[in-house]
């Protein structure tokens, strides 16, 4: 019996009651079955391999519809690898006019956020955008306003 050893550190451990420390450890001279192995490979054919694409990977140019925190749907497009997405309305505006000015947002004229045709999109400053959305619904843009906002991109 090891009376010289101090087992006081086991006092609060209910799983070690009446057991010496490391009772289940390997005995001297015992070699473990996985010595020298770098992980268990029970099914190498189905394991993830380095460089393998995820099952959720989508190619550049893929369009998808997302629902934001306000429960509104918007169309997004993947523009660059590995995972850069952009609102499709902004993508269409940049494709048609070449740029989107700093501080500008895209506005859907008919209020349908999934209708991303260039005739339905106008870019305007973020500070002017709330004017066209109010508590009574969507406020339409006049021809004069449309010409003014489009003239900023010519």
Image (cartoon, rainbow, N blue to C red):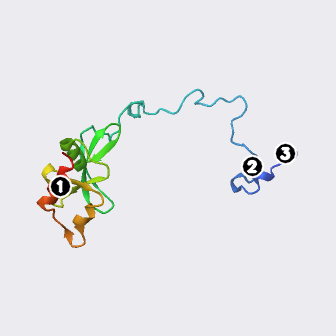
The quarter of the rendered structure image containing the N terminus is: top right
- Looking at the image, the residue that sits furthest to the bottom is 136
Q: Mark 3 = which residue?
A: 5
Going from N to C along the chain, the mark reached first, 3 or 1, is 3
- Name the residue: 29% across, 46% down: 86
Residue 45 vs residue 24, the one in the foreground: 45
How far is mark 3 from mark 1, CA to CA? 89 Å
Q: Mark 1 = which residue?
A: 148
Please provide percent x and percent y for residue 121: 18, 53
Please provide percent x and percent y for residue 147: 14, 54
Q: Nearer the viewer, mark 2 or mark 3?
A: 3
- Name the residue: 74% across, 45% down: 21
Q: Secondary structure at mark 2?
A: loop
Residue 52's image quarter?
top left
How far is mark 2 from mark 3, CA to CA? 13 Å
Q: Secondary structure at mark 1?
A: helix
Q: Is residue 25 left or right of residue 144?
A: right
Residue 28 vs residue 41, the one in the foreground: 41
- Name the residue: 33% across, 40% down: 55
Q: Mark 2 = which residue?
A: 19
């Amino acid at each position: 019996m090891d009376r010289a050893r101090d087992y006081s550190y086991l006092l609060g451990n209910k799983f070690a009651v009446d057991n010496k420390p490391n009772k289940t450890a390997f005995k001297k001279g015992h070699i473990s079955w996985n010595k020298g192995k770098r992980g268990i490979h029970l099914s190498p054919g189905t394991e993830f391999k380095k460089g393998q694409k995820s099952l959720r990977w989508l190619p550049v140019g893929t369009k998808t519809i997302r629902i934001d925190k306000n429960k509104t749907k918007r169309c997004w497009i993947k523009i660059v690898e590995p995972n850069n997405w952009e609102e499709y309305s902004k993508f269409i505006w940049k494709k048609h006019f070449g740029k989107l000015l700093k501080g500008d947002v895209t506005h859907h004229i008919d209020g349908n956020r999934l209708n991303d045709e260039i005739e339905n999109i106008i870019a305007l400053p973020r500070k002017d955008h709330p004017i066209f959305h109010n508590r009574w619904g969507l406020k339409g843009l006049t021809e004069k306003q449309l010409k003014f906002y489009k003239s900023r991109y010519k």
